[in-house]
């Protein structure tokens, strides 16, 4: 994947991205459930970046990076950590790139409970934190199952997420519609059964990459 990464900027004409020192307010989010790890890591990566539902970064960015991934796929975390997180770390705090998260069923489930949980967190501008935190704690999901108790523990660990509101949104029609729309889009694009990244440029250019 490494030869592809620079093309996010170079291949689509996003030239001259300037490296800047950015001060990130890292929130601890209060007492954390003992088993959940990676809270400070997700806040370092995403804290302070504008979010709107599935989107991360400014809405007027010239380039959109759409990520299709499955939170409950045990091999998809590798793609998240090796490809997606480094792209976010390098570009999300610029004005040039906006990221979009789409839930793409790879693990054998039609739609996954974790996808609903992350999308519900997106109602409060915390979807990217929740999704990345789930990936960092997939061992808990394997040990305990993707239970409502585990999903709530993760929600309680996301800084500044109002858990009671998250629980209401989790079973809402709006969240279900968004997850189902992601599933339909993945089918329309005929993506392989692998996590994927689609990069769209200002003039309609498009590049795709997957494992």
Image (spheres, rainbow, N blue to C red):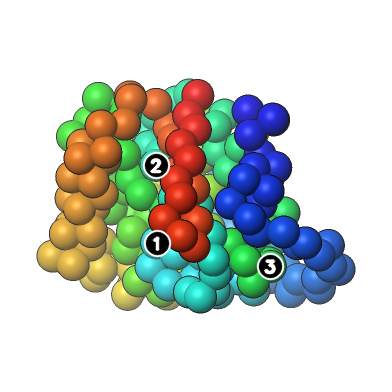
Task: Say which residue appears at 64% left-offset and 71% top-offset.
Answer: 95
Q: Which mark is residue 24?
A: none
Where residue 139 appears, x then y in whole percent?
Answer: 51, 30
Q: Is residue 20 left or right of residue 17?
A: right
Is 5 positioned to the left or the right of 206 in the image?
Answer: right
Tell me the element at label 3.
loop
| Residue closest to the eye, 119 or 12 | 12
Mark positioned earlier in the residue sequence (2 or 3): 2
> Mark 2 highlights which residue?
68
The residue closer to the viewer here, 171 or 177, is 177
The x, y position of residue 152, in whole percent, is: 38, 56
The residue to which callout 1 is attached is: 54
Q: Is residue 63 visible?
A: yes
- Look at the numbered disc 1 and give the secondary structure of its residue: loop
Q: Is residue 10 left or right of residue 171?
A: right
Q: Earlier in the sequence, mark 3 or mark 1?
A: 1
Q: Disc 2 or disc 3, which is closer to the eye? A: 3
Which residue is at 63% across, 28% downward? Answer: 1
The mark found on residue 94 in the picture is 3
Q: Nearer the viewer, mark 3 or mark 1?
A: 3
Q: Can the viewer see residue 34 in this picture?
A: no
Residue 178 on image: x %, y %: 23, 59
């Amino acid at each position: 994947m490494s030869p592809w990464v620079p093309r996010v900027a170079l291949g689509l004409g996003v030239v001259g991205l300037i490296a800047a020192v950015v001060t990130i307010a890292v929130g601890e989010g209060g007492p954390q459930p003992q088993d959940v790890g990676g809270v400070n890591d997700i806040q370092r990566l995403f804290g302070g970046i504008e979010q709107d539902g599935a989107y991360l970064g400014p809405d007027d960015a010239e380039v959109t990076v759409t990520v299709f991934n499955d939170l409950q796929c045990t091999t998809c975390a590798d793609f998240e950590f090796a490809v997606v997180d480094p792209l976010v770390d390098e570009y999300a705090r610029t004005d040039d790139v906006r990221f979009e998260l789409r839930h793409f069923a790879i693990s054998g489930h039609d739609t996954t409970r974790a996808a609903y949980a992350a999308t519900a967190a997106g109602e409060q501008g915390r979807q990217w934190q929740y999704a990345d935190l789930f990936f960092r704690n997939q061992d808990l999901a394997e040990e305990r199952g993707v239970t409502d108790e585990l999903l709530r523990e993760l929600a309680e660990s996301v800084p500044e997420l109002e858990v009671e509101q998250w629980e209401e949104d989790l079973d809402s029609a709006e969240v279900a519609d968004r997850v189902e729309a992601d599933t339909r889009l993945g089918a329309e694009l005929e993506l392989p059964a692998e996590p994927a990244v689609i990069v769209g440029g200002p003039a309609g250019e498009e590049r795709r990459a997957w494992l």
